[in-house]
Image: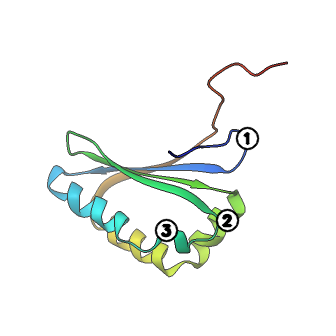
Amino acid sequence: MNVIDTGHGVLLFNVFRVRPENQRALADAIRTGGDPGALPGLVSMNVLRSEDGTHVINQMYWESRAALDQAVATSPAIAATRKAVSTLIEGTGPLKYEVLPVAPESP
C-alpha cells in the first residue's frame, strides 16, 4: 500500500488528455520510460487509465520539491519519456496537491 505522509514531500499528478486509440501507447510510454527506483527522491509512482479511454494520469510522490526539480533537470529517462508523451497527448495539466489528513488532528 502506498502511504503518503501529510505535510511532507510533493505529490504530482500529470493529467493527460488523449484520444482513446492512443491511451494504451501513452500509458506504456510512461510505464516503460525507465526504472523509477533509479530516480533519487521518488517515493512512489502510479499510472492510471480512465475507463472511457480519454485520460491517463501519472501520479508521482517525491520526498521533496528539490528532488523533483533535480530529476526533471537531469534525468535522461524523464526527458525521453516527456518527448514520447508529447507526441501522444491532446492536452495536459500537471497539478500539485497538498495531502491533508483524513481524520481531524488532535489539538
- SS category of the residue bearing label 1: loop
- Closer to the eye: label 3 or 2: 3
Regarding mark 2 in the picture, which secondary structure is present there?
A: helix
Determine contact: label 2, label 1, CB under 8 Å.
Answer: no
* Mark closest to the chain's N terminus, 2 or 1: 1
> Cα distance, mark 1 to mark 3?
23 Å
Would you say the residues marked 3 and 2 are in contact, meaning their CB atoms lie under 8 Å apart?
no
Image mark for residue 96: none
Label 3 vs 2, first from the N-terminus: 3
Callout 3 amino acid: Pro
**Which element carries disc 3, helix, strand or loop?**
helix
Question: Residue 98, percent across and down?
Answer: 64, 39
Q: Could you give the CA–CA distance between mark 2 and mark 1, rounded to whole angstroms?
A: 16 Å
Horizontal arrangement in the rendering, residue 70 relative to residue 95 (left or right): right
Q: Nearer the viewer, residue 74 or 106?
A: 106
Residue 15: horizontal and vertical position, in percent?
A: 40, 48
For disc 3, the marked residue is 36
Do we see residue 102 in this rendering?
yes
Alpha carbon of mark 3 to alpha carbon of mark 2: how far?
Answer: 13 Å
**In the image, what residue type sits under mark 2?**
Ala
Q: Residue at x 41, y 77 (%)?
A: 80
Sequence-wise, the earlier of marks 1 and 3 is 1
Look at the image and tell me whether residue 86 can be seen. Answer: no
Q: Residue at x 67, y 57 (%)?
A: 63
Label 2 crowd (10 A; few <14 / some 14-19 / many >=20): some
For the C terminus, give its image quadrant.
top right
Q: Which mark is residue 67?
A: 2
| Number of the label disc, if any, that sits on residue 7 | 1
From the viewer's perspective, tell me whether residue 9 is left or right of residue 82: right
